[in-house]
Image: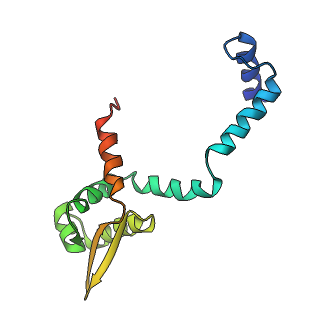
Amino acid sequence: MSVSNARLRRLVSSGICKAENVEKYATELKRLARSVYDENLLSPMERFFKALGDSTRLKMIRILSMKEMCVCEIMVALEMTQPNVSHHLEILERVGIVKKRKEGKWKFYSLARPDVVDLLKNFAKSDHS
């Protein structure tokens, strides 16, 4: 018996959990876990949230929420080198958060997903201490 099954058995036997059959309940729990997310969506979702897991990229999202910007403008605003800015923008573009348009030799970036800003604002409003 696995450790998790033994713990589940103890939980059920304590009377706190109202399950009658531990094996049947374990099967139901596994079915529930499989039904929560489409496995095909987990990998893109993981990449999306990893892209948000960097303070530089979060800053880029906030400034791009205010206006479309050229790479050189982002470089100046965040005091970064062009290769570093381009690297972060590429990550954000790959997951669909930003989009670019070219005008001659210049590349301008804007938010492709403005709803990401709402996500970040809601996160900032909630208590995370």
Label tally: 0
**Colour mode?**
rainbow
Q: Considering the image in quadrants, where does the N terminus appear?
A: top right
Seen from the viewer's position, the closer of residues 72 and 29 is: 29
Q: Which residue in the rendered view is the most extreme toward the top?
A: 14
| Figure quadrant of residue 13 | top right
| Figure quadrant of residue 18 | top right
The correct choice, above or below, for 11 with respect to 5 in the image is: above
In the rendering, at what x and y percent does residue 123 appear? Answer: 34, 41
Seen from the viewer's position, the closer of residues 124 and 7 is: 124
Seen from the viewer's position, the closer of residues 14 and 75 is: 14
Residue at the spot 23% in from the left edge and 65% down from the top edge: 80
Residue at the spot 76% in from the left edge and 30% down from the top edge: 26
Residue at the spot 72% in from the left edge and 37% down from the top edge: 30
The correct choice, above or below, for 77 with respect to 26 in the image is: below
Left/right placement of residue 45 relative to residue 13 reads left
| Figure quadrant of residue 107 | bottom left
The correct choice, above or below, for 102 with respect to 17 in the image is: below
In the rendering, at what x and y percent does residue 55 appear? Answer: 31, 52
Q: Considering the image in quadrants, where does the C terminus appear?
A: top left
In the rendering, at what x and y percent does residue 92 appear? Answer: 39, 64
Residue at the spot 25% in from the left edge and 69% down from the top edge: 81
In the rendering, at what x and y percent does residue 114 appear? Answer: 32, 58
The correct choice, above or below, for 105 with respect to 101 in the image is: below
